[in-house]
Amino acid sequence: MWIDEQIWGHRLWDATTPWLIFLEFLGVAEAKDRDQSLLDGQGKTYPLRFKPAQRMYVRNILYNNEPMLRIADEKLADSASWDKWLSAIANRAQGVPLRDFSYLRKRFNSFSDFVALVSMLRGTTIENGPNKRWSSRFVFPFGRHALYEDLSLTASREYINFGLPGELVYQMLCRSAYATELAPEIAKMLDGDPCDRLLQLMEPDYDEDRSTRGNSYLPYARHESFDDLGQDWLSLLRGPLPRFDTYPHLASLTALHLLRYQLLVAATHCFSAKPHFICEIIAPKRTPVRELSISNFQSNDTLPSRAVDAYIDAIGRSEEWERRRLGETPFPDCRRLLVDIVRWPEEDDYSGQPDEAELLADLKRAAQARHRKHVAAVHRSYGAGAGLVSRRGTSQLRYAPTDALLKSLIMANVETRMDYSEFLDLLYRRYGLVIGEREAVQVLSDDEFDRKSFQMNSARLERRLRTLGMLRRLSDACAYVENPLSVRM
Amino acid sequence: MNGLGGRWVRFLRQYGPISRNDNMYDEQIRRSARRYDVDALDFVHPLETDLFSAVSKGAERARSIILTGTAGDGKSRLCGRLWTELGGSSDDWTANEIYQEITAEIAGRVRTVGIIRDLTALPSQGTYGMWEGKNALLEAVNKSFFSADPDWIFVVAANDGQLLDTWRRSAEVPLSQESYELLEACLVEGQPASQGDVAFFNLSAVSCARIIDLTLEAIIAHPGWAAAYAEEEAEGFFSEVCPIRRNFEIMSSPQFKSRLRQLFELMDLNELHTPIRRVLLLIANMLLGHPSAKDRLMSPADIRPFVRAGKAHIADIHQNLFGANLTSARRESLEIFEFLNRFGIGDETTNRIDNILVFGPSDETLRPYYESLVVGAFSAQALDDLSALRNDYLERPDATQEGEHPFLNSLQAQRRAIFFQIGDDQSDDLRLWDLTVFRHAGEFLRDVVKPLRDVGKANRSITARLVNGLNRIFTGMLVTTDRELLIAAGLSGSAAGLSQILVERISVAPRRHERIELRDGNLPTLIVQIDSGVEIGLKLNLVRYEFLMRVAGGALPGSFSKECHEDILAFKSAILAAFSRSRPMEETKDLSFRILSLNGEGEPVDDVIEVNFA
């Protein structure tokens, strides 16, 4: 079946984290940069073909290297330590063409230096949940030599950690209005850090055997959310933050834009209004804003599934469907049309009556069942990952931005300082976030809107930002959101 | 009670936290002073002299004047004073025209001064002198900012938020963008802009300590008090058992005044501003607050009934100071009480203090403290109540059905009172400042702020402890180093908790061009100089000072203030950035890492590991 994919692409995958999406993206960028076509689609939108690096030597050294510390503890003479470790790793290493690590000996002055540096690098491993399989562990993306694709223990492609959303992000940036400006900034992420050079030294000089990947698919040539994403990347990468300090912000804002993309596309399919997010700035007790946020979350949460229904309804309303339905052999003709459009039903997917209306209803059931497994969960998974969706202080999910997300939003949007009410307006216009009364009144009906509680909501945000050192109130009438990095101490 | 003393107290009550006070503008105060037939409070605003000299004959040059600040800072009053100073009659002023003109000799020749007493109240349609409409007037104001020797100058009074807002919204008026930038630079950065000229008076920049000095002095010196003593009524107004009289006497005592001033000085050091109107509100509440009175403020007529009902002593200045007489909603809505309650006075304590409060009367060694601290702070009636509660608690310390034993609830009030009772000579012995959240506040005032102000430097040992605190945050390790600053970086950006790559050590004692020292400024500032002429400063407000001292003392950085932790990390980023500008890394093929670790004594050792990149 091929429905979610036609609406949103192949694929939005829920079982991942913002960091993994970010790493997956960087892996694509590195491969494309190697081909000298970074963020340059050369007019072609499909397929996205690239050859990601695997770097199995480094990965064995970092993550499949249990003997190293044990041998270091034995405190043997330097050359004895090397001998012992080289033979241990040669037995143990997997996925490398030649199990010979002796090149390392020349590159490090002593075995203990080597151990210290490996331990140091390991300390930067990106946490990715309970998955402890060594071939799915990722070091901090210092540069191109720290980027590699997710693999199984037998060195074949794995989709557990990299489930393609990172490839979608690459294509979104590639198709955004900022692609040309972004390319040199993203290229800077790939080279120059000492740790990247260190990782390079841990690989032997050889040409890695790499496979071509190219399964992802993004259905739209342009979309406003691609431009929003590109704009945030550009302002963060050009901003005052040191390069690595931008990464957490890039990761969380990327997840936020993917979430917006999913809902914006869904809303278009359902002919409904552009979605917004009523954000509760967490209050100690239940407030009207919390209630509104909970119901706003629930309504947004069903939007993608409504889009799936709308997509199928559109087939049922199409001229082609109607033509076949009125033809000589309506059922087999309609069935064939479905197979052509959505690749369903295959073989024994459908066992009901030979009736085209029945068939369409069954398609809806099957499509919804499939949708529920992963794509439906993207809203809450990316929302939680980005720091927008949370259950904190209550039993129901709603929009309640974390401090980290607020900081990312300020870093990406406030160059030096911005009037507080202007900032709230900007969050609404660019991200659909509703926090203060002026924004709430634009999206709520008269009987839902409660001025006082949105004023208090905005006052709570102000207090939060102040304790984060990102807001200065000059008086009752005058407050500024400040980018702490561009303000003098 | 209709004598001057009684009328004065009733007039003073108008300043308190009653709902009408929200609209207590200068004009109304004068009107109500006339009604009660008392002299209104009068003192010279700290900025008045500077303001007058800006429009004097001998001024260096003629410039337009902005008077800004938050509501209640005294803009209207200063504006009126300026009007009379320029020769205007006070009758013309009370006519309440928003725009008025006067000619005067300023900076050598006669010029016209246009005074806008409230910019926001200025209707956009209207005739203002020779100008038709607000925009035309604004244009003239803009021109005066950018003219070297203007014939017209303007005095504009406006709330700070509305000030910038007005210029932001009038983009169609010529020069508005330039004026906006000029005013924003003055207001937000507190510095003169590169282009244009204006005499900018930000009333919110006046220190709280100055304001409390001036207002206390003006209130205490008011002739109404002498009259009140003369009007003393037996068992009633201004008798010996009258809480207003008692509160007034405590407030006039040097001990109370100096402790209160310290709190206001600390508010300045915490970058909190409170306008004059709010300070007057506080003082009125301190003197007159009582939870059972109408509007929770006593009038002279309340005294006798309260005394008869045995409720007079509840009007305690030490409680009223923190707004305890008000409802919690009212208290929280008033910034001045929020500021004062941030000190946590009454909630923080030490074992020693609580022992004095609980066992003081019966324990030989504690009794002298009890006598001087508690007996001196409360009225006889309050002491009777307390001792009954205490005895009951000592016999049956269990919780009652309504919650904790009422004696425990009374401890907060007692601690507040003795916070004002402990003299400076006892403050070390009794660890006075441990009764607040800011345990190092006393030290900050005595060993940092004062010496910096008086002699321009502070004791080395203070710098050493600050550096120790910084080192613990910079490295993420429990280091003991205090003679050099360890500039360490994380491998994967500032988000990493541990910073194990040592970039540089900077000596605290002057060495080559390096040095670390405390300097006086608006706030005490820790200066890190890494090269000749290259220095980075960290402004030490009270919270940051407390934070660094607590970290140096062993507290975890995350546990006291997240904001400070972020601030200090941003300070490190600033030092790192200065390093990369001042000592750029040489382009080299060599690759080496300077890894920081701790030895057994908590001293940092760094190993340089080189890698062969050939």
Image (tube, coloured by chain):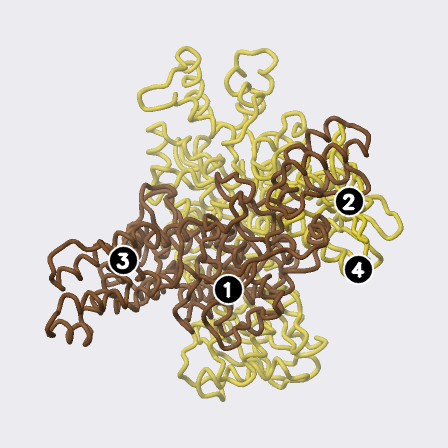
Chain colours: A brown, B yellow
What kind of residue is marked 2? Arg
- Residue picked out by circle 1: A170
Label 1, residues with CA under 10 Å away: few <14, some 14-19, many ≥20: many
What kind of residue is marked 3? Ser
Task: Give the image location of residue A72, x and y in percent.
Answer: 73, 31
Instruction: Please name whichever residue, B518 or B409, is drawn nearer the observer in this view of the structure.
Output: B518
What chain does badge 3 belong to? Answer: A
Confirm whether residue B229 shows in the render: no
Same subunit: marks 3 and 2:
no
Label 3, residues with CA under 10 Å away: few <14, some 14-19, many ≥20: many
- Residue picked out by circle 4: B584
The quadrant where residue B328 appears: top left
- Residue picked out by circle 3: A305
Q: Nearer the viewer, mark 1 or mark 4?
A: 1
Q: Classify mark 1: helix, strand or loop.
A: helix
Q: Disc 4, disc 2: CB below 8 Å? A: no
